[in-house]
Image: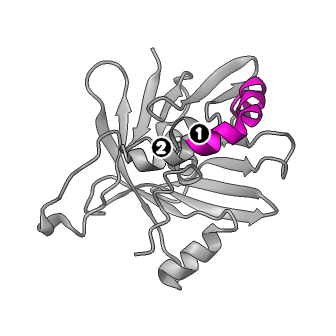
């Protein structure tokens, strides 16, 4: 059985004003032995220019996150920093609590990198590259074929307003399967936005950072708030 990571699986309602300053987003982990448990609280890390500077850098593909051990920011689990972001290719480092390298994640935007699909390369420190492509070619072909209909579906999806249904059926294929040495160590499934860690040697902190990054480039854009 695979370990599973997911971000914000439960939408919270109105919170106690006393906890307004706490980190709201959550990353949950499940190994199948019990209910999912919160293992980290992701939060964007703002540069000296604050929110405007972060959003400006974000448009180039840059991201900066902290994964906190608790909602009150008492201890870091990991940090995601951008090494470079230009031309549709972004390179991120995932660092541990002491600044040690956990792994590197590279996102190559569709038609900007090395293929017709968005490519994600995950490299654990001292480990092999794990390469994944967003969606399958056949489903992308079907999606483009019915693109005019998708525009109508998108309007109804927006009017629907159901949490977690951003874009609905109009969204392009989002499943990602990573391959390395004939194995599939990682798999992001669009149903429930869950990352499955099929290889037990993959550091869950690297998986948590990957979930936060993938979700930030999706319709959710959890780190794009103007406040």
Color theme of the render: one colour
- Is 214 part of what is drawn in magenta? no
Q: Position of residue 177 (x, y in %)?
A: 65, 27
Q: Position of residue 140 (x, y in %)?
A: 74, 32
Mark 2 or mark 1: which comes first in sequence? Answer: 2
Of the 4 image quadrants, the one containing the C terminus is: bottom left
Q: Secondary structure at mark 1?
A: helix
Residue 209 is at least partly visible in this image: no
Of the numbered discs in the image, which one, if any, rests on residue 2? Answer: none
> Disc 2 to disc 1, how far (Cα)?
8 Å
Q: Position of residue 92 (x, y in %)?
A: 65, 56
56 lies above or below 159: below
Residue that lies at the very extreme toward the right in this rendered image: 114
**Residue at screen point 52% across, 39% down:** 207
**Which one is nearer the viewer's eye here, 138 or 222?**
138
| Labelled pair 2, 1 in contact (Cβ < 8 Å) | yes
**Which one is nearer the viewer's eye here, 66 or 127?**
66
Q: Position of residue 221 (x, y in %)?
A: 51, 56
> What is the magenta segment's predominant secondary structure?
helix
The residue tagged 1 is 170
Of the numbered discs in the image, which one, if any, rests on residue 157? Answer: 2
Residue 221 is at least partly visible in this image: yes
Residue range of the region highlighted in magenta in the rendering: 128-152
**Residue at screen point 47% across, 19% down:** 2
**Which one is nearer the viewer's eye here, 36 or 17?**
17
Q: Residues within 10 Å of mark 1 (few under 14, many from 20)?
A: some
- Is 145 part of what is drawn in magenta? yes
**Residue at screen point 25% across, 64% down:** 22
Q: Secondary structure at mark 2?
A: helix
């Amino acid at each position: 059985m695979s370990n599973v990571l997911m971000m914000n699986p439960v939408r919270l309602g109105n919170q106690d004003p006393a906890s307004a300053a706490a980190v709201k987003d959550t990353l949950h982990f499940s190994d199948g032995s019990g209910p999912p448990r919160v293992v980290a609280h992701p939060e964007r890390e703002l540069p000296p220019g604050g929110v405007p500077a972060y959003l400006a850098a974000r448009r180039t593909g840059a991201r900066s996150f902290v994964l906190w051990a608790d909602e009150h920011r008492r201890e870091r689990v990991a940090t995601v920093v951008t090494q470079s972001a230009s031309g549709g290719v972004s390179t991120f480092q995932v660092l541990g609590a002491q600044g040690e390298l956990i792994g590197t994640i590279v996102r190559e935007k569709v038609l900007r990198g090395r293929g017709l699909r968005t490519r994600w390369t995950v490299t654990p420190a001292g480990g092999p590259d794990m390469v994944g492509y967003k969606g399958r070619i056949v489903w992308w072909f079907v999606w483009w074929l019915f693109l005019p209909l998708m525009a109508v579906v998108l309007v109804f999806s927006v009017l629907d307003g159901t949490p977690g249904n951003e874009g609905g059926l109009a969204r392009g294929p989002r499943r990602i399967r990573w391959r390395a040495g004939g194995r599939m160590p990682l798999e992001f499934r669009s149903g429930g936005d869950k990352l499955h860690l099929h290889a037990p040697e993959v550091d869950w902190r690297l998986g948590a950072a990957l979930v936060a990054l993938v979700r930030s480039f999706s319709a959710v854009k959890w780190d794009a708030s103007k406040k």
